[in-house]
Structures are given as structure tokens and as C-alpha cells.
Image (cartoon, coloured by chain):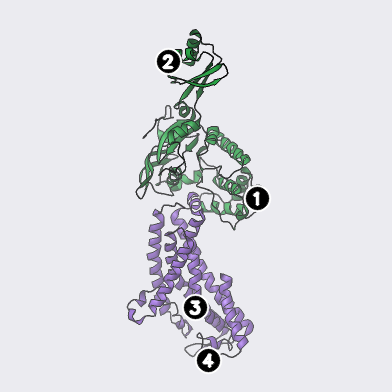
């Protein structure tokens, strides 16, 4: 783990490879002089829904390509479902469904024909159940009515659904979905969310890369945040949130008194917005030092008329911005 | 493309039919013989297609094999399926080889058909002066088709290799066709005679021996060995390149 807070979310893990669907050690990829992926240690527990976060161009897709054996790693090791990658790629990949950097299909073939072709490419896929599996996969993503339509007539969202259907062609132990909700309408996004939940409930590990934080916040149990080729935070979602700042907000007409009490407790109060007679005092709130109820008691004891008292954890978005920087520029 | 290829002998036969008289000794070889025996439409069609049209279509197909999938973005899904890189490469080469055969057969069969339709079909006088029956002559045409198919297999291997180098199919197609053309140009320079037996296209037009009685298979064998060499070298290069390639498209 390099840079940022290191949070491991494998309590009581006997052997990392047994309990992990994905495990990387010092994984790096260099393109020319640029380190696209810089020594990352990912640990995706089996059965988790793992959010892989990061701004555009931070190395998420490159990492996914290495996981699937599409690109070779410059350095480091990968274990997928307990097997070494790329050495055991052929044994592992049939159990892995993937959507990598946008769906891609033959435009002159129908959706079903495209799936048929991709399924035929997998030697392990039984041909006897092919039609049935294609039908079920299309049904699952709500494309049954467009199965016979040529892909060139599909909208972006439909192609995206077809890409997900491809990942679902066989029962998978692990799904790797790169930006699965790209181009989907709000309804489609909801469907993908419930699809991911139902897959996870069925025991499939789902690895979702995304830059949509709300998305990740809603469906994921674990997450890692990547920035400029490095992993800056990793762990369960609640761990990640907790690692962020928690803010205390006190609404009271006795601003001065409240400041005094908070300062005595070792906090650094700041005076916020004045709303009529009530003032707002805020302070960064270190969780371990003093509990909220003690602060409340101290304030009341100090004669502060409490009209509002709020302990607010940061959202994932605030955490994300804090970890990856505010700027709009694509990091190099 | 197969339809276009099949159209060539039809075009030739129609032209001969409409002008009715072809001055002997002008135009492609055997052209003057079509009117007297329809089977020659197939031979002439093949002969005319060899320098450019067949290499063009084979170049398009072979150049598209891997680069086409990469350009569409479907390559990553095939590999993640998993298709297996070696297996995919082999399947693509077999596909290209099947196209070589279909392309040549399209010319040969449509030639025989249009020839039979527009002109009389009779026993054929071979280059050695012997005359063979119509059935035997058709076998000879198919033998020539086999010879030309083999001729194109080396080029298909070159195309396969070039196709692993790029994500832009048009680039690989053009490069493959350029290789075929350059090979033919070099084969026409007497100063480079030492190089000629090693050129991809050296035996392309050397099927005349199959029109003798008995047919001589010397050229057929030399050609097959040469093409096999090209397949081995460029197949190995394609393997080396493709199995280590980072698929980033």
C-alpha cells in the first residue's frame, strides 16, 4: 500500500488468495516513460460488490486489462479466483464475465447473433444450452424484444445492455464491469443496480469500475480509490467514509459560549452562517477523542442553548475529492 | 467480393461473345480460344485475376483478420471469452485460407458456367498437343484452381502477421496488397534473378504444366514448398507478435 490511508478489509483472513476473488501485489504497468499503474495492491473479497473508483485516466481500465490477461503487467502479480494470471488464464476466464471499456459488437449482426459468436469463442461453453443461455442473458438485461435487431440499430444504452448480457452468458464466479452504467438512462441505471445486487446475492463477486460515486455508494460493499496510477484508499465502504472527516455542527444563539466550550474540549470551532437569532458553530470532529454525547452534555452544562446538534460524516464524494484532488484536468 | 470475383470470367466471356472475333495472339493468353471452347473462359478468368484481383481480395480478408477485430473492439471480448490467442490466430488463418479457396473456385466455377452457357464445350487440346475429354478438362481447371489457392496461402500468412501489428484494418490490408505487388515487380526485374525463387509470387503464373499430358507437378511442388515456407515464417512471426501483444483497443 502506497500513499494515503491504508485500510485492509479482510478481518480474520486465513489465506488472502482463498478468500479473495482478486488479489494483486505490486501490480504495475508502464507505457513508455509513464507509469499507468504504479504498484497497486488490490484485494477484492469473494462475494463482495467492489467499487473501483477513480477519475478518468487514472489507470482503472489498464488495471482491468491486466486482470483479464489482455495486457501484460510490467511488474507484480495477479491472482484471480485463486489462480495465477496470466499463467492460468484459460482455466480462470470461463468463470469471469467482463465488460471492458465499452461494449463492442459486429454492427452487421443481430444482438443474439453477436452473443452466439462470442459464446462459440469460449471452448468451455456448452453448445447444447447456448440458445437458452443467450435468451436468458438477453432477458436479464431487458433486450429480448431487440434480440433479432442488428446491433448497428441499437442505441448506446442498448449496446451497453448487450455488453452486460455477454458478461452473463455463463454462470460466473466473478464479474468485472467497467463503467456498466455508461450511456444508460436512469431506468437502465436502476436496472443495472438491481441486477448487480441480485448477482451478488447469488454469490457472484462483482467488481465495478466507475467514476459515478453515487452509483458505487448505493451498490458496493467495498471500494478502492485510484488516483494517478496508485491506490489511495481501499476497504469497506463504511471504513472509507469513516476515514474521512466528520464535522460537528451546533446551532445556538450563544455562539460565543459554544465556541468556548468546544475549544476547551480540544476542538477548533469556527463560526458559520448566522440565521436570525441562531448562529452556527462548526468544528472538525475527531471520532476517537471525544464522543458526541459528551460534547452535547458539555455544551448544555456550559449554558449553551442548543437548538441544533449534528455530527455529519463526509459523503463518499467528499472523500473521493479529498483523495484525488479537486481539479478537472486529467492527471498525467 | 466473391460475387465480384465470379463476375470477372462473365465479363470476359460476354466481351468475347459480343465482339465475336478476337484477333489471335492479342490480349491475355487463351482469350482467343474462348469462342471455340467455353472451358477456356475459366482458365482466362483465373489468369487475369492472378496478378491483381485475387491478391487484392485475399489482402483485404487476411489484413482484416486480427486488425478488424481490434478496430471494432471485439478482440478483447473474444480473448476474454476466452478464445485463447493461439486458437483465435489459427481460426483466423483457416478462415483466410478458406476464403482463398472460395475466391479461386468462384472464378473457376463461374468461368466454366458462363463458358458453357455462351460457347460450345468440347474436348480440349492441351499445350502438349494431346486432346482430353470435357470431364478431364474440368478436372484440369480444378487442378489449376488448387494450384492458385496454394499460391495464395503464403500471402494470407503475410496478411495475418501484418494484421497483428495494427488496430487499423485498412493499414494491414493495404500493406498486404503492397507486399504482393512489390513481389511481382521484383519478379520482373532480371537483375534480381537470384532473388526470384524466393519471391512470394514467383510461381503464381506457373500452372501451364498442368495443361500438359501427362501433367507435370514439379512447379506445383516447388510452389507448395515456397508457400509452406512463407506460412512457417510469417505464421511464427504472427504467433510471436500476437501472443505477447497488449490488447488495448
Determine which of the numbered discs, if any, sits on residue A263 in the image: 2
The answer to whether the residues at label 2 and label 4 have Cβ atoms under 8 Å apart is no
Label 1 and label 3: CA atoms lie apart by 47 Å
Residue under numbered circle 3: B144
Kindly report which numbered mark, 3 or 2, lies closer to the viewer in this rendering.
2
Q: Foreground residue, A61 or A167? A: A61
Kindly report which numbered mark, 3 or 4, lies closer to the viewer in this rendering.
4
Question: Which chain shows up in purple?
Answer: B
Q: Are marks 2 and 1 on the same chain?
A: yes
How many other residues sit within 10 Å of disc 1, few (<14), some (14-19) or many (≥20)? Answer: some
The earlier-in-sequence mark between 2 and 1 is: 1
Label 3 and label 4: CA atoms lie apart by 23 Å
Q: Are marks 1 and 3 on the same chain?
A: no
Label 2 and label 1: CA atoms lie apart by 65 Å
How many other residues sit within 10 Å of disc 2, few (<14), some (14-19) or many (≥20)? Answer: some
Please give the name of the residue rendered at 65% of the width and 47% of the height, measured from the top-left corner. A144
Residue under numbered circle 4: B24
Amino acid at each position: 500500500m502506497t500513499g494515503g490511508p491504508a485500510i485492509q478489509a479482510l478481518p480474520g483472513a486465513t489465506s488472502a488468495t482463498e478468500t479473495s476473488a482478486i488479489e494483486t501485489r505490486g501490480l504495475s504497468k508502464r507505457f513508455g516513460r509513464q507509469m499507468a499503474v504504479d504498484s497497486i495492491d488490490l484485494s477484492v473479497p469473494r462475494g463482495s460488490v467492489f467499487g473501483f473508483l477513480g477519475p478518468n485516466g487514472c489507470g482503472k481500465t489498464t488495471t482491468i486489462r491486466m486482470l483479464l490477461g489482455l495486457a501484460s503487467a510490467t511488474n507484480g502479480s495477479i491472482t484471480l479466483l485463486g489462480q495465477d494470471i496470466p499463467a492460468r488464464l484459460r482455466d480462470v476466464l470461463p468463470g469471469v464475465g467482463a465488460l471492458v471499456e465499452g461494449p463492442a459488437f459486429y454492427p452487421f449482426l443481430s444482438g443474439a447473433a453477436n452473443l452466439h459468436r462470442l459464446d462459440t469463442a469460449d471452448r468451455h461453453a456448452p453448445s447444447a444450452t447456448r440458445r437458452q443461455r443467450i435468451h436468458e442473458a438477453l432477458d436479464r438485461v431487458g433486450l429480448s424484444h431487440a434480440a433479432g435487431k442488428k446491433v448497428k440499430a441499437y442505441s448506446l444504452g442498448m449496446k451497453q445492455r448487450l455488453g452486460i448480457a455477454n458478461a452473463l452468458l455463463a454462470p460466473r464466479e466473478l464479474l468485472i464491469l467497467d463503467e456498466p452504467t455508461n450511456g444508460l438512462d436512469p431506468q437502465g441505471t436502476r436496472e443495472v443496480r438491481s441486477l448487480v445486487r441480485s448477482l451478488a446475492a447469488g454469490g457472484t463477486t462483482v467488481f465495478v469500475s466507475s467514476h459515478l460515486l453515487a452509483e458505487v455508494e448505493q451498490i458496493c460493499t467495498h471500494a478502492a480509490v485510484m488516483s494517478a496510477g496508485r491506490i489511495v484508499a481501499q476497504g469497506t465502504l463504511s471504513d472509507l467514509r469513516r476515514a474521512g472527516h466528520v464535522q460537528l455542527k451546533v446551532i445556538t444563539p450563544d455562539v460565543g459560549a459554544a465556541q468556548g466550550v468546544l475549544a476547551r474540549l480540544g476542538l477548533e470551532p469556527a463560526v458559520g452562517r448566522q440565521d436570525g437569532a441562531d448562529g452556527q458553530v462548526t468544528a472538525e470532529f475527531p471520532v476517537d477523542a471525544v464522543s458526541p454525547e459528551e460534547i452535547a452534555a458539555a455544551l448544555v452544562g456550559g449554558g449553551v442553548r442548543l437548538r441544533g446538534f449534528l455530527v455529519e460524516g463526509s459523503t463518499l464524494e467528499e472523500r473521493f475529492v479529498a483523495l484525488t484532488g479537486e481539479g478537472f484536468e486529467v492527471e498525467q | 467480393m466473391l460475387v465480384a470475383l465470379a463476375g470477372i470470367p462473365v465479363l470476359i466471356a460476354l466481351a468475347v461473345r459480343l465482339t465475336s472475333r478476337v484477333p489471335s495472339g492479342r490480349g491475355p493468353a487463351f482469350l482467343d480460344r474462348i469462342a471455340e471452347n467455353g472451358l477456356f473462359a475459366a482458365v482466362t478468368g483465373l489468369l487475369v485475376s492472378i496478378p491483381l484481383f485475387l491478391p487484392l481480395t485475399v489482402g483485404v480478408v487476411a489484413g482484416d483478420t486480427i486488425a478488424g477485430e481490434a478496430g471494432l473492439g471485439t478482440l478483447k471480448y473474444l480473448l476474454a471469452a476466452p478464445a485463447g490467442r493461439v486458437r483465435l490466430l489459427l481460426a483466423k488463418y483457416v478462415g483466410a485460407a478458406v476464403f482463398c479457396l472460395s475466391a479461386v473456385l468462384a472464378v473457376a466455377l463461374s468461368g466454366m458456367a458462363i463458358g458453357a452457357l455462351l460457347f460450345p464445350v468440347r474436348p480440349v487440346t492441351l499445350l502438349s498437343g494431346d486432346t482430353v475429354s470435357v470431364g478431364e478438362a474440368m478436372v484440369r481447371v480444378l487442378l489449376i484452381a488448387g494450384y492458385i489457392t496454394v499460391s495464395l496461402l503464403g500471402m494470407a500468412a503475410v496478411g495475418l502477421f501484418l494484421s497483428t501489428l495494427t488496430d487499423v484494418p485498412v493499414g494491414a490490408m493495404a500493406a498486404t496488397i503492397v507486399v504482393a505487388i512489390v513481389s511481382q515487380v521484383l519478379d520482373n526485374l532480371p537483375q534480381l534473378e537470384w532473388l526470384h525463387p524466393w519471391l512470394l509470387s514467383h510461381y503464381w503464373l506457373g500452372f501451364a504444366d498442368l495443361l500438359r499430358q501427362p501433367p507435370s507437378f514439379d512447379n506445383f511442388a516447388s510452389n507448395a514448398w515456397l508457400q509452406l515456407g512463407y506460412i512457417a515464417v510469417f505464421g511464427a512471426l504472427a504467433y510471436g507478435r500476437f501472443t505477447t501483444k497488449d490488447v488495448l483497443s
